[in-house]
Image: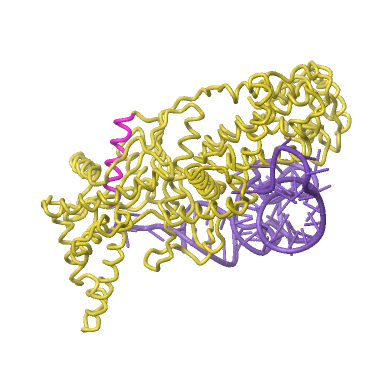
Amino acid sequence: MSFTNTIQAAAIKSLEELYGTTFSANDFQVNETKPEFTGDYTVVLFSLLKPLKESPDALGKKLGDALVKNNGGLFSNYNVIKGFLNLSLSDATLFNLLEENYKDVCFGKKPLNHKKVMVEYSSPNTNKPLHLGHLRNIFIGWSVSEILKANGNDVYKSSIVNDRGIHICKSMIAWEQFANGDTPESTHKKGDHFVGDYYVKFNDEYKKEVKELISEGTIEAVAEKEAPIMKQTQQMLQDWEQGKPAVIELWNKMNGWVYKGFDETYKRLGADFDQTFYESQTYLLGKEFVRQGLEDGSFFRKEDGSVWIDLSAASLDDKLLLRGDGTSVYITQDIGLVKQKFEEYNLDESIYVIGDEQIHHMKVLKEICRKLGMTFADKIFHLSYGMVELTTGKMKSREGTVVDADDLVDEMVDTAKRHTEELGKVKDFTEEELKELYETLGLGAMKFYLLRVDPKKRMIFNPEESIDFHGFTGPFVQYTYARIKSILRKLAGDSDEQSMTASSRNIAGENVLPLERQLIIFLEKYSNVLSQGADELNPSVIANYVFHLAKTYNSFYTEHSVANAESEEKKALRVQLSVMTATIIKSAMQLLGIKVPERM
RNA sequence: GGCCCCGUAGCUCAGUGGAUAGAGCAACAGCCUUCUAAGCUGUGGGUCACACGUUCGAAUCGUGUCGGGGUCACCA
């Protein structure tokens, strides 16, 4: 229960004693007091005035008096401005809050819900390397998984690899025709980039052939179908489905190159999966499923042999499930996979991290499951996130405006290196330590940048201005952490951390200063933010919180000294505040997949 | 055209019923002999797209208009 709720419960109790009727949480609001007013929490009185036939001032005074008197010193005093009753917490309350929170955060409080959830994310095609869009997807998927875990759920991270289909054959054909036996090893290229180059090569060649045919008098639509390289590709897809050994061998070889490249990138990004599904397997499940559905009359066949489902009941159009020639379409494998997921893992929820362009697709998938009486239809959740666009418009691979994931990471790590060298604070670091620090900072900046925005919203990335290292950024938060650790290292010289953080209870005589008060109250909110992040499946909630926490600490830090505090008691309090802040920063950043350095 | 999402400072974004709408960047002015200046403090910057409505109270809820995007494939 959050502290706001505690206060509301106290207010309800007081109101009931004062007026002899019952009240509920919906009758009035309790908020945090705005900084320009005195107080910590505010009871908004307006909604109570009419039913109680009171004036704002009279009600404020009655309720304020009662709250101060009846809660064992919870509040020190109050003030009433217009319809707002502002309550100030007593120092004793603040110490208690800190103490309780300290125990929860530093020694762990396990939340209650215990759902089995699968989070599917990344889901790349094996014909080209990962790009900026994948990065947003990967960071959101990974972070949401960790946030759900931190709230006590069993989470399986999964990925579906789109490893078959005409687009995969395109890069295969191009390699066969133009590579002269080159490999990633022989060209010293990362496998996914190597294969991606042949995908581009295919498109160049295809365009050339179409143009040639048109110049020979073929009309465009025909030329597009008749271009020799396209016909060869279609033939290859058929050969693949029939399992022709040479094609399968090539397919395995090239996908192997791509996986090696992906693994490298995932490793660097810190992304991991408990289960990887392959479309080359799930599409067979889907086909089998369609066969059954056709038998029991859930689906129908048109004259050309294609198979459909009627979704008019959900006011959607008929949906194609299998082509006339028996090959499967995009949604066919999805149906196979959804069934497999729920049957094998007994899930309470299956979350798909997919772009918002596929909202309709996911709606259709859900509707198909529902129509087929699959009980898990309502446990499918599409976590749709907005596309990442560039200031110059959309990313298009054909126009070469795609921001490559590996390139961007390299660039960020380089920038981190440059900044660090300019500041020159870690000259005593070894090569290894420096390398690690640059990765921590570069990736931290990038992840924070992509996660601080609400996933649902589209976001715009300006490739000209590189991602910042100042202000509302990962490195800002990392820096705050490093500064705290620096203080604690110095203090650890005279006493160990245990006794440093022992207790602030014996400082009751001291006044808690405004900046200390602010920190204590802000720290208390963390557990709420955690559950909010899980409820909304939204890492940006965490990112925003941890930034404000760091900001609050920095203000405190510049005003008050920890090591040279006015008294030993003050020092104990400030050490405890520092330890708490560092612990929460580390934990929150971990949920975003961001490491924090001891020094920077 | 139908359905869905979005519109808040010059830019990138917070803020889903409460007080004078906030941050970061950019601009300007200050702060390092004291725990790390990747920091802190301050100044300027707003018709919360527009209109009407609901409410004691609306950026937030409802309706409509305008503007931007997505989608409605035998592409994935």
| Left or right of A225 on screen, residue B55 | right
Q: Quadrant of the C terminus of chain A?
A: top right
User: Which image quadrant is residue A400 in?
Assistant: bottom left
Rendered residue at 54%/64% (across/down): A464
Of B31 and B22, the residue lying toward us: B31
Chain drawn in purple: B
| Left or right of A124 on screen, residue A486 | right
In this view, B74 is above or below A277: below
User: Which image quadrant is residue B34 in?
Assistant: top right
| Left or right of A353 on screen, residue A64 | right
In this view, A36 is above or below A231: above
Rendered residue at 67%/29% (across/down): A524
- Looking at the picture, how far across and down is residue A284, in whole percent? 20, 44
Residue A276 in sight here: yes
Residue found at the very far bottom of the displayed protein = A216
Q: Quadrant of the N terminus of chain A?
A: top right
Magenta segment: does it hold A225? no
**Magenta residues (range):** A330-345
